[in-house]
Amino acid sequence: MLTTVYGAKCIGIEAVPVTVEVDITSGIGIHLVGLADAAVKESLLRTVTALQSMGYRIPGKKIVINLAPADMHKKGSGYDLPIAVGIIAASSQEELPLSGKYIIMGELGLDGTVRHVPGAIPIAELASANGSDGCILPAESAAEAAGYGLTGLYGVNTLSDVIHILNDEDKGLWALGNAASVSPEGPPRPEDNVSEKRLCGTDTASGTGTGTNTDDDIMDFADIVGQEGAKRGLEIAAAGGHNALLVGPPGAGKSSLAKAIVKILPPMDREEALQTSKIYSVAGKGRLRKGIPYIRPFRNPHYSTSVAALIGGGSDSILPGEISLAHNGVLFLDEFCEAPKRVTEALRSPVEEKTVTISRLRTKIEYPANFMLIAATNPCPCGYYGDGDRCSCSPARRAAYLSRLSGPLMDRIDIHLWLKPVDARSIVRKEQAEPSSAVAERVSRARNIQQNRFSTEGIRTNSEMSGRQIKEFCRLSVPCQEFLEKAVAKAGMSARACNRILKLARTIADLQGDDAIGLAHLSEAISYRFLDKPDIL
């Protein structure tokens, strides 16, 4: 008897259907075909043991299991559950009239329990889009997608739960997806962003970073002593989605400022939250994100991370890297000049294109990577250049150290900030500074201006403007044109650096509520490009 059960496979952040065909005829042996990898082939032994532990028999005949389409590689342990359902239905041990109406995925334990599989959100979206009645997933996986109102979503803990659903026995006990589960209030307000306790941060499961960030890990701007110029630069960066480089001696507050930027960024809207969650779901990290995650992700990989961990990749399956996990959020790279050249230069294309394409011999996958890059570095090998006479490096060593930041990469970083050591008066007196909540309100207003400006352009922030959009939205008066021409010629800036200045000036004008870019806006924007000057050291 031939039985058809439907599963799915994630390609990038989208899922495609996989048909699991099970046929039981005269003969002996269990045969699995359809370009299955080792994990799928091992599922046969797990599935047989689980079925026997649940009281089902394995027919003493030839069982042929085909995973279609046969020219697409199938990877992972998620096909355990559809294979088990197919064997039960094909051997007529259960009728399972609804077995062909759902997408079913899950890993089986030897005792019949169902375990988490990655990619729950794309799989649930596929079930909603292709006319299925819904999907059946492990309870932990289904919880990832439950907050998005996807109908027909069922979370199960054992194989018996799946059998009850497919026999149409009180399915409501396992139903999770419904429109009522979505908060009617939408994203939190900027002031709510400050007290949010759960952030989309680096996690210990990835093997990088310092753990999932909580509100206690992140300083408020009011608690950071001095560095008002750097705070202003990061406010502009947050308002326009610009990349920034922090240069300064140890203890100047580079890491604290970079982490504090999370509190001044506006929360993600629903579309951004869904796309970011899909990336985490495909990467198998969705279990760390409960509910709808409106707080923007903050990723902080160590500077020794590999290119594959940063960009994405893998031998068995192509997984998203840190730059994709930081999509719609912040990627913070500390000790930027200490990172291998190959790692830093790999950021060139993603920073510019806002996507990353990972190619293998038979596969090419594109992941979104629209992130804010915040990098931090010391100004020299000893770290103390600019801190009185503490620096022991020669001018040649200082120049060689910063030359690790290539010109093409610096062109792609909009804001260069030089942090000087905080003076003793500020450290001792700890004068009250402006809190993050006040900065977040200005950033939110500037973002709203950009959202209205680009409502028909397909972008959200000034940093994403193309050459055509710069011409349209960054028009300059004659005095401003002459001023910019002189500045660009004097510093020998590239065309890309000039465009970055125009984008920055547009953001500064938005923060001040001005419709036109003025000389003051241009002047401030140019001041953030000090690394373009040949005599900086």
Image: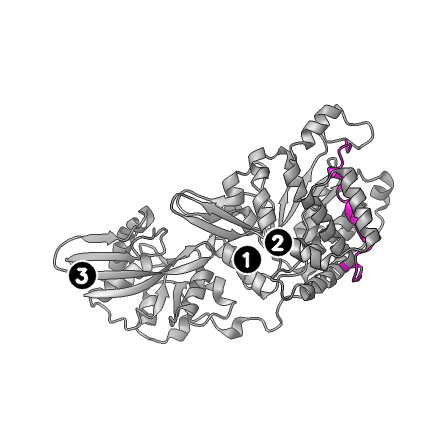
Badge 3 element? strand
Q: Is residue 228 visible?
A: no
Res 21 → quadrant: bottom left
State which quarter of the image contains the N terminus: bottom left
Identify residue for label 3: 24
Q: Marks 2 and 3: in contact by CB < 8 Å?
A: no
Total marks in image: 3
Q: Position of residue 14 (x, y in %)?
A: 45, 59
Q: Tell me which numbered mark, 1 or 2, is placed earlier along the sequence.
A: 1
The residue singled out by tag 1 in the image is 276
Report the front residue among 221 and 14: 14
**What's drawn in magenta, residue-wise?**
510-537
Q: Which of 62 and 48 is in front in this view?
A: 62
Q: How far apart are marks 1 and 2 (CA)?
A: 9 Å
- Is residue 446 positioned above or below 309 on the image? below
Q: On the rendered structure, is 488 left or right of 429?
A: left
| Label 3 – label 2 distance at C-alpha | 51 Å
Mark 3 nearby-residue class (10 Å; few <14, some 14–19, many ≥20): many
Q: Name the residue under label 2.
A: 329
Q: Position of residue 98 (x, y in %)?
A: 31, 72
Which residue extends farthest left? 26
Q: Which amino acid does label 2 sit on?
A: Gly
